[in-house]
Structures are given as structure tokens and as C-alpha cells.
Image: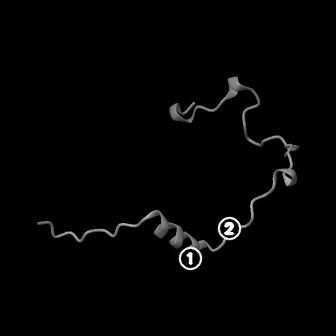
Amino acid sequence: MSDAPEEPRFTDDDYAFLRHVRFGELPPAVRPEDRVELTETDPGRGTPETPSQSWDLRHGA
């Protein structure tokens, strides 16, 4: 016989309830017609400009 106490078993409904208690109601989903396409205008900083300049941090290069 094991001395370790048995862990409680939760159902999906139990987990859903616990998520609701912790985080509350989710905001309504964004409708497809309200979505917009993003366009990056600022180039990434500190990233290699060409694939040949890619970082290789594993080998300390």
C-alpha cells in the first residue's frame, strides 16, 4: 500500500470552472470583418540583414 495521498482527479468541466474563477469571462471574439492586416514599417533591430549573416550562438561564432 502506498503512503502517498492520491491526487484529485478533475474533469474537463472542473477545469473549465477553475479557469472561469481565475480569469473571468473571455472578451468577445473579434469578428473577421473587424480584423485588420498589419504592415511592419520599422525594420527589425539587431537582426541579420541576409540569411548568410544568421546568428550561430551555439558555436560562439
Depth order, front residue of 13/57 = 13
Q: Position of residue 29 (x, y in %)?
A: 75, 60
Q: Position of residue 11 (x, y in %)?
A: 42, 65
Q: Amino acid at mark 2?
A: Leu
Colouring:
one colour
The CA span between labels 2 and 1 is 11 Å
What residue is rendered at 53% in x and 67% in y? 16
Q: Amino acid at mark 1?
A: Val
What residue is rendered at 86% in x and 43% in y? 39
Above or below, 52 against 15 in this view is above
- How packed mark 1 is, by other alpha carbons closer than 10 Å (few <14, some 14-19, many 20 or more), is few
Image disc number at residue 44 = none
Q: Position of residue 40 (x, y in %)?
A: 85, 43
Quadrant of image for the C terminus: top right
Whether residue 29 sits left or right of residue 11 in the image: it is right
Q: Which residue is label 2 attached to?
A: 26
What residue is rendered at 66% in x and 72% in y? 25
Residue furthest to the top in view is 52
Residue furthest to the bottom in view is 21
Q: Which residue is label 1 attached to?
A: 21
Residue furthest to the left in view is 1
Whether residue 1 sits left or right of residue 31 in the image: it is left
What residue is rendered at 81% in x and 55% in y? 31
Q: Position of residue 1 (x, y in %)?
A: 11, 66
**Mark 1 element type:** helix
